[in-house]
Image (spheres, grey):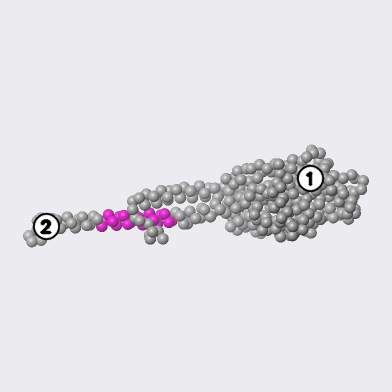
Amino acid sequence: MYKIAVMGDYDSIYGFAALGLDTFPVTPAEAGERLHQLVADGYGIIYITEALAADLRQETARYEGQILPAIIEIPGVSGNTGSGVRGVKKSVEQAVGSDILFSN
Amino acid sequence: MASTQITPTRMELTKTKKKLVTARRGHKLLKDKRDELMRQFLDLARENMALRQKVEAGILAANKNFVIARAGMDEATLHTALMAPKQQVSLEVGKKNVMSVNIPVFDTKTRTADANDIYSYGFAFTSSDLDGAVKSLADILPDMLRLAEVEKACQLMAAEIEKTRRRVNALEHVIIPQAQETIKYITMKLDENERSSQIRLMKVKDMMLEDAHHYSERA
């Protein structure tokens, strides 16, 4: 049995608590440690705001090759930085060699 | 490199020929694997992008609703309203094997079946905007979960495709040509040796006949 977590600044994520997801408001400084802790605690999906994920590239890279956890970027309250979409393009680029699907 | 290190023997030739057959077979199989993975990956990537755009738009709209809801109530009320959620989402994780890549399959269960349990507060002290905001977020949740599944699958498959592609290329452009080169070299060397021993035998025969019959003196 796994759980679902949402990480980010409080303003961006407090709504998810009502849906039954576990929210973890964190500052960028403590986010890395908290992420590893969440993975160890059995969270299968971890949603992270794009702004925070930008600071956590090194930490999230560790879990990229594993089947769990799925670390998914979501836009925060301050707006969409486009890094989630870039992530999708990056995997296309990695697989194909160049972005043939979304380059236009 | 082929010509410097190998010894041109029949043993080596047989070995290299076997290696070439294996390499060709492996190349074909890996190429098929890559093509199939790529086909599935492209479908998945398209779905991933569509879902992501939908989810991002949804969350953005929900966030706007939350900002409005927040403006109509004081911080403490909002805090209290969302402090003790009634609903709890838990996750079952299965695995699906796609061309030897394990991708996750997520199945979610909510603690209570009632869809209205997302409202974890009494309606007396909160603004109706909050209800709308929570609802808009709840509507996007199934897509968010599907997004998690698809995006993770995409990442895993992209890594596998990259690996497979490298293997295919290595076999196609390095291993197979090298083996062919080696085979050619050994065959030529063996032929050369055979010709040389043939000539030596003919020469010896000539000399022995000359010794026995003295053709050159008779002529």
Q: Residue furthest top?
A: B113
B83 displayed left or right of B170: right
Asked if residue A49 lies in the magenta stretch, the reply is no
Residue A3: % across, % down: 73, 45
Name the foreground residue: A58 vs B52.
A58
Check disc 1 and report its element: helix, strand or loop. Answer: loop
Q: Separation of disc 1 and disc 2 at Cα?
A: 107 Å
Q: How many marks?
A: 2
The quadrant of the image that shows the N terminus of chain B is bottom left
Q: Amino acid at mark 2?
A: Asp
Q: Which residue is mark 1?
A: A20
Q: Which residue is mark 2?
A: B211
Q: Residues within 10 Å of mark 1 (few under 14, many from 20)?
A: many
- Span colored in magenta: B177-196
| Place of residue A101 in the rendered image (x, y in percent of width and height, measured from the top left) | 64, 55
Give coordinates of residue A18: x percent, y percent. 81, 47
Q: Residue at x 79, y 53 (%)?
A: A13
Look at the image and tell me in which quarter the C terminus of chain B lies.
bottom left
Q: How packed is label 2: few (under 14 Cα within 10 Å), some, or many (20 or more)? A: few
Residue B112's spot in the image, x, y percent?
A: 79, 39
Frontmost residue, A42 versus B206: A42
Which amino acid lies under the numbered mark 1 shown in the image of this protein?
A: Gly
Q: Main secondary structure of the magenta part?
A: helix
